[in-house]
Amino acid sequence: MTPALPARVGYVLKRYPRFSETFVVNEILAHEEAGRSIDIFALRRVEESHFQDILARVRAGVTRIPDRPRGANDFWQALLAAAEVLPALWSRLDHFPEASGEDVFQALLVATEARRRGIAHLHAHFGTLASTVARIAADLAGITWSMTLHAKDIYFGYEEDHHLGLKLRDAAAAITVSDYNLRHLADRFPEASAPVVRIYNGIDLAAFPWQAPRPEADEILAVGRLVEKKGFHILIEAVRILSAEGRPIRCRIIGSGEEEAELRAQIAACRLGDGVTLAGPMPQAEVKAAMRGAAMLACPCVVGGDGNRDGLPTVLLEAMALGLPCIGSDVTGIPEVVADGRTGLVAPEGDAPALARAIARLLDAPDLRTRLAIAARRLIERDFDIRRNAPAIGALFDRCATTRRAGALPRARGAA
């Protein structure tokens, strides 16, 4: 018997591409490598000017969905077009009392294209806008949907209710990226009926060949958006402490974001202009080159004042794969990859003196850096290989689509 082809899947994303979301691109590339047809639906305009080089390898087409109708007639025409391919449309439109008109409009367009293209399953990254539209579109199209939950979508205190509990009841399945998240979701949403599984974000190990740390390296590297949860203000304070002890410190922070002015002011106030550089965003190839020459990666994440926090930063996985020793904090899923004294060093959240001690320890012990780097690569190969993790996601998609074809899934019905 000829094996069934993988289900065609539509990825519903708020913005595509996004500089900081290489994990989405890695996932799509791995699905395509395995022979799966992917369609990408982007719900908002691209806001960034820097992109990762690997985007050029993605074959999937991108359909940019207007974020709102231009008027009542535009909405009506979308309804009429949808009715031509969605037989149960009119009976399903009352399923979403919690949704906005803009959400339903975008979902109509996605559902129409899904049916026209033979898409069997929709998948959204993040439990906010993308999953809102994917949920409605899947119900209108009579197909299944799932979502990957990361960090901000779980922990941030949004003013707008994104109905995460409702989505965890209606989705065919949900994925999250750390065991920490899995435990939190189980505690917060005990009524969730969607199976929630932990599948780590994977990376392409072939693109991150391991290299032993350079014993003479002395630069501290940090990579990420310049936002509170990344804890770069803690890193700058740790550098100030080390400088006050008479250590000549070189630190480079790669990235851009809303806290750039505050961080520059902190650097100036600490008189660290010669030691700490805010380098701005860089393509992945340049980030990798920086990692090759650095002594360590510092990832001092914290829980922000608004509850926002990192789940498990991809930059840690990339650095560990390359052979760059890492210092992490004890926030969320980071200890699942940075085990203190085994695969890296851990400084308690927000503890600049402890971070300074960890930095000094690595600077003074090249042999320790090598030992940690070897163990870290083994962990990444075991748990974070995209060519192992993406098939698990693909199998989940196929199970969901098969269950819908068998008629075992109930229709979604929202409640505010």
Image (spheres, rainbow, N blue to C red):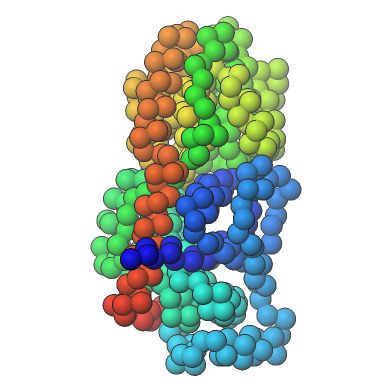
Q: Quarter of the image containing the C terminus?
A: bottom left
Residue located farthest toward the front when viewing the structure as drawn: 1
Residue 78 lies, with reference to residue 269, above or below; the image says below
Residue 402 pos. (x, y %)? 35, 71
**Residue 157 vertical placement versus 96 (above, below):** above
Give above or below for 363 relative to 388. above
Q: Is residue 196 left or right of residue 223?
A: left
Q: Position of residue 194 (x, y in %)?
A: 31, 66
Quadrant position of residue 342:
top left
Q: Identify whether 97 is placed above or below 33.
A: below
Residue 239 screen position, x and y as percent: 56, 19
Please indicate, yes or no, whether residue 39 appears anywhere in the rendered image.
yes
- Residue 258 in view, yes or no: no
Q: What residue appears at the point 45 percent right and 71 percent down from the top-left corner?
A: 120
Q: Residue at x 50, y 12 (%)?
A: 363
Where residue 126 appears, as percent x and y from the top left, is 48, 58
